[in-house]
Image: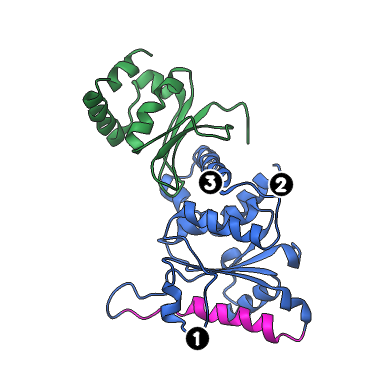
Amino acid sequence: MQADIKRVHIISRINGGWAVLKQGASRAVKVYPTREEAVLGSYPFLQLGYDLVIHRKDGSVEQFKKAAETALSGVSLDGLEKKAATKSRQNGTTISNASKQK
Amino acid sequence: MSSFDKNVFINCPYDDEYLPLLKSLIFTIKACGFHPRIALERFNSAEVRLQKIKQLIEESCYSIHDLSRIKAAKAGDYFRLNMALELGMDIGCRDYHPNPIFRDKKLLVLENERFSVQKGLSDMSFGDCKSHEGSEEKLIKCVRDWFYETGTKKIKPASAIWNDFNVFMTNLYVEKIEQGYKNEEIDHILIPEYIDWIDERFNGK
């Protein structure tokens, strides 16, 4: 696979959970219980200019966000954003802050 | 045309619901160094379907029979018998074909839940069926492990193939969007087109 591409993938895991996987890496950065939390966990990579790819459970692409898009729009992840934002508020962090820093 | 000992005949349902599983199945076969053969690989109205299947069976040393969808979905529906018929043809080829090369045929039977196939095909002992529970990720593990068990040792672990499949699906998505495809068209990509695209990837386009 192309090594120069900066992409971070949110993919399902066979034993449950969702992983944040840097393209080209053999191991996931971290595995989260839900996809929404994994999206939230990918934010540091978005700040480094990575594209974000959110996969369905079957491996196909549900959302593809270019780094430039996420930087300009402050990361709009449709339904996922709302769920992640709710969770992050419960956890004491804010998804919008992560977006505004761009 | 690829060689007999690398060909894998795929016997599975051809419906929208099964399509995601079929995509992961085809990818895994390629990732393990084999060549998928499926009735959908070419379309010719003049070709007799059963004849085509017979030809594919005779051209393939390996075969994967996914019987996970043979059960009727609701009351009043019939059993789906095509997959069981093709499994029977493949076993017949292995056991009765005059050419002894077919005695080495290797078969994998997939099912949804453990022992579910036995309920419909009780004449056979399916102790070695593998169940994928309708999960693409589990299907990849079933197929990869089967290739290993039948003698293909130099293959990646299932988790790595799953990661590669997700990346592959992304590359496919990006390229097709650039070519003007709509999301719906990418999700329902033609199987021959999908196989061509995988071939290009694995042959180092």
Q: Which residue is mark 3?
A: B162
Tell me the shade of chain A. green
* Lower sequence index among marks 3 and 1: 1
Front of the two marks 3 and 1:
1
Task: Please give the chain letter of the residue carrying mark 2.
Answer: B
Task: Please give the chain letter of the residue carrying mark 3.
Answer: B
Left-right relation of B136 to B93: left
Inspect the image, locate mark 3, and give the three-letter code of the amino acid beneath it. Answer: Trp
Which residue does the image show at 44% across and 62% down from the upper left? B18
Inspect the image, locate mark 1, and give the three-letter code of the amino acid beneath it. Answer: Asp
Report, in whole angstroms, how far the alpha carbon at label 3 lies from the one at label 1. 35 Å
Report, in whole angstroms, how far the alpha carbon at label 2 lies from the one at label 1. 42 Å
Report, in whole angstroms, how far the alpha carbon at label 3 lies from the one at label 2. 19 Å
Which residue does the image show at 56% across and 66% down from the upper left? B40
Check the image and report above or below for B47 versus B173.
below
The quarter of the picture where residue B160 lies is top right
**CB within 8 Å, label 3 to label 2:** no
**Tag 3 and tag 2 share a subunit:** yes
Check the image and report above or below for B136 versus B103.
above
Reply yes or no: does residue A94 show up in magenta: no
